[in-house]
Each structure stands twice: as structure tokens, then as C-alpha cells.
Image (cartoon, rainbow, N blue to C red):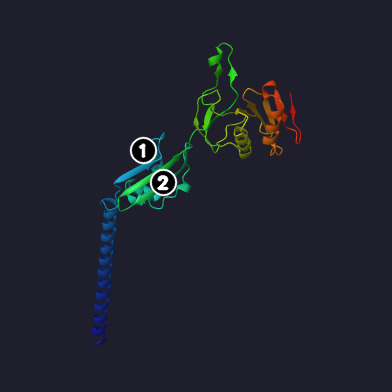
Amino acid sequence: LSQKMVENILSVRRNFRRRLFFVWAGLIFFIAYLIVVGAGYFVFYTRFFKIEKFEFSGFQKTDAVSIKHFLILKQIKNSSWRRYLTSDNFLFWFGFKPDNIELPSYLSSFKISSDFLERKVSIEASERQPFGIWCSSEPQANSSQPPASSLQLPVDSCFWFDEAGALFAVAPSAEGLLIPLIFDNNIRPERLSPEIFSIFWRLYNLENIKIVKFFVKDENLKEFEAEIVNGPKLYLSLKWDNSDLEAILEKLSQEVKFQNLEYIDLRVPGRFYYK
């Protein structure tokens, strides 16, 4: 064969291989496209991943639907890819981590579980239960009103707190012996400080002494006051160890009548004064 014929044969083979490569590449791309489109249709439009039922438990005072919407918004904010899915798709709730969600103040915890076979997602919550009332300042008597309705507080100055000391909801101003009250001169915290809540809990649980009203003074001075029912005021300092508090009060209650005292001062380490 002549040199020219050989070159023509080689050129034809190169063109054939090039065309064959593009045919296979186009075929592979087309198949991949069909797979992607089919997978997308399968995920987004078929009922295979569709949730048939949302089940809520533990919601007594809270609107469960509003919590569901709250979780949906938080999910989208934390994982932007979820915005392309609807909330009734199982994949939307895939990899959900409750620890990454800042809960509303009135919930102490919640968990989410899913059952693919039953097409169900369960949302279980624990609501905070009111235990006592925290108020931003001590109510002042209004002399123009009769005694029965003389205690007035600014709007939203009182909040419920639970047994863990977390403030979570606006509360009415209250008086009486049924609900423990804490009046605080400082900025409202999200949760009562451990040292304040510890001394509150110990005083509230005294066996033979009834205390339901507590006062937190300037937090820099670390002074704490309590009012014994039908008895004197207690003055305490959070700077010192109050481990013998219960023993002192129990002993003192046996020696003197509390209703005859004006105050008991326990702010000096190792000593106590009363009048």
C-alpha cells in the first residue's frame, strides 16, 4: 500500500474512534441523566418516602402544630439542603439532632423518632411545670387601694420557674402560702444561679419551718433574705458556707418563738444574731 492509502486508513480509524467515544459518552450521560431524574422523581413525587402520620405526645399547654413548624424552620436553618424537601418527606428528618436546636423556654426537652414501615414520625416533648414565681422586684402596696388588692406589679415583671430553676413563662403577681415567691433586684436571668437556687431549695424544704417568700438583693453583695411565715426575716450571705443553716434554724426554733422575733441574721460566719 502506498503511503497515502495508509494515512487515509489511519485517519478513518481515528475518526471512527472519536465518534465512538462521543457516542459512548453521550450514552453514559443520557443514562446518568435518566438515573438522576428517576431518583429525583422517586424521592420527591412518589409515596415511598412520604410520611403518613405525625404523632405528638407530651404537649399539654403547648400547640403541637406550632412546635412542628418551629422544628421545620430550625431544620432548614441548620441544614440548607432540607429546603428542597417537603416536611412530610422522611429524608427531611434524616439525621435530625435535637442537641443542635435551641428549645423554646417552655420546653425542657424533646425527641424525635421515625418509623419507616408505619410511615410515621413521633415528636415527644417535656413541658416545664410551674413550681414558683420569680418577680423582678418586691411589690409595693398602693395606699389608694384596699388591702385585698393592694399589691401591684408592672406587666411582665413576674415569671414562672420550674423545679430546675429555669424561668419560662409570664406569671401573674401572687401572694399567699401555696406558691414560693422570689423577688429579685437584679436583671432577670434565664435560670436562677446555682448558689441562689440551692439556698432557696434548702430553705423551702425545711421540715418544721414554713418559708415561701425569698428576696435576692444586690448580686455583688451576695445577700439573700427569706421571710418565715408568721415569723422573722432571715438575713443570709452567699459568700460563706451555709452548711449548718438547717441545724441553726431548727435549734433556734426550739429555744425561742419565731413569731416574737423581728429578724435572724446569719451573715457572719460561725455566728448568728436575732432580735
Nearest the viewer among 107 and 16 is 107
Mark 2 residue type: Gln
Give the numbered dot on residue 65: 1
User: Is residue 201 at all visible to an observer of this figure?
Assistant: yes
* Left or right side of 165 for 18: left
Mark 1 residue type: Val
Label 1 near label 2: C-beta < 8 Å?
no
Task: Indicate whether 55 appears above or below 154.
Answer: below
Mark 2 vs mark 1, foreground winner is 1
> Callout 2: 10 Å neighbours few (<14), some, many (20+)?
many
* Left or right side of 158 for 246: right
On the image, which quarter does residue 263 sit in? top right
Nearest the viewer among 27 and 248 is 248
Q: Secondary structure at mark 1?
A: helix
Query: Residue 5 appears at what percent x and percent y?
Result: 23, 84
Query: Residue 170 appears at what percent x and percent y?
Result: 49, 29
Which comes sooner in the sequence, label 2 or label 1? 1
For the C terminus, the image quarter is top right
Q: Residue at x 26, y 66 (%)?
A: 26
Query: Residue 169 appears at what percent x and percent y?
Result: 49, 32
Give the numbered dot on residue 75: 2
Q: CA distance from mark 2 to mark 1?
A: 15 Å
Q: Residue furthest front?
A: 254
For the N terminus, the image quarter is bottom left
